[in-house]
Image (tube, grey):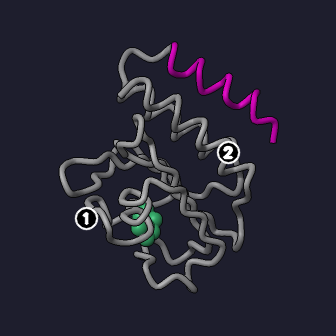
Amino acid sequence: MDIEVHLDKVKKIIKDSKNPDEAMNSIVSYLEQNFSHYSWVGIYLVDGDNLILGPWKGPASTEHVKIPIGKGICGAAASSGKIELIPNVELDSRYLACFPSTKSEIVVPIKKDDKVLGEIDIDSDEINAFNEEDSKFLDNVAKLIVEIL
Ligand code: SME
């Protein structure tokens, strides 16, 4: 993966978008379409004590459109402010299942200073799909998103 090339594309998406919703929508589409191991991509935004699902792209919708902070892998990342990289979701007791096909997951907080405003959540149908490069790349995407929130 050439991180810089993809980050430039994300910057261009933000620049060309009329508003934050349009930008986030186009970013999830870009991620889902350009990375074959990103099977489902969504952005959750913090609202009080919950995470609310915003734009998403993938083969199916999820029932988890509202997740209490602290619950599931998404809620854990929102409460700690740290990236959660789960190589095998079956082995993580916190995991809230959305899709039967999901094997691994990464959740990257979107933070302004130390405050979590949201997160990027990606499910993969491949086991152990995510590595440090994905973490670094998605953390940089999150830093671009926070600028428009
Ligand atoms: N698996 C997540 C829930 C969100 S779905 O993956 C879209 C979790 O454990 O928090």
Inspect the image, locate mark 2, and give the three-letter code of the amino acid beneath it.
Lys
Residue placed at 29% from the left, 62% from the top? Answer: 69
In the rendered structure, the answer to whether residue 37 lies left or right of residue 31 reads right
Q: Name the residue that disc number 1 marks.
A: 68
Residue placed at 50% from the left, 31% from the top? Answer: 26
Q: Tag on residue 131? A: none
| Disc with the residue nearer the chain's start (2 vs 1) | 1
Rendered location of residue 48, percent (x, y): 18, 50
**Which quarter of the rendering shows the N terminus?**
top right
> Does the numbered disc 1 mark a residue whose Cβ is under 8 Å from ligand 1?
no
Q: Residue 102 falls in which quadrant of the image?
A: bottom right
Q: Residue 62 falls in which quadrant of the image?
A: bottom left
Task: Please state which of residues 86 and 64 is positioned toward the viewer in this rendering.
Answer: 86
**Which quarter of the rendering shows the C terminus?**
top left
Task: Please state which of residues 105 and 139 is positioned toward the viewer in this rendering.
Answer: 139
- What is the magenta range? 1-15
- The correct choice, above or below, for 21 with respect to 54 in the image is above
Is residue 25 a member of the stretch shown in magenta? no
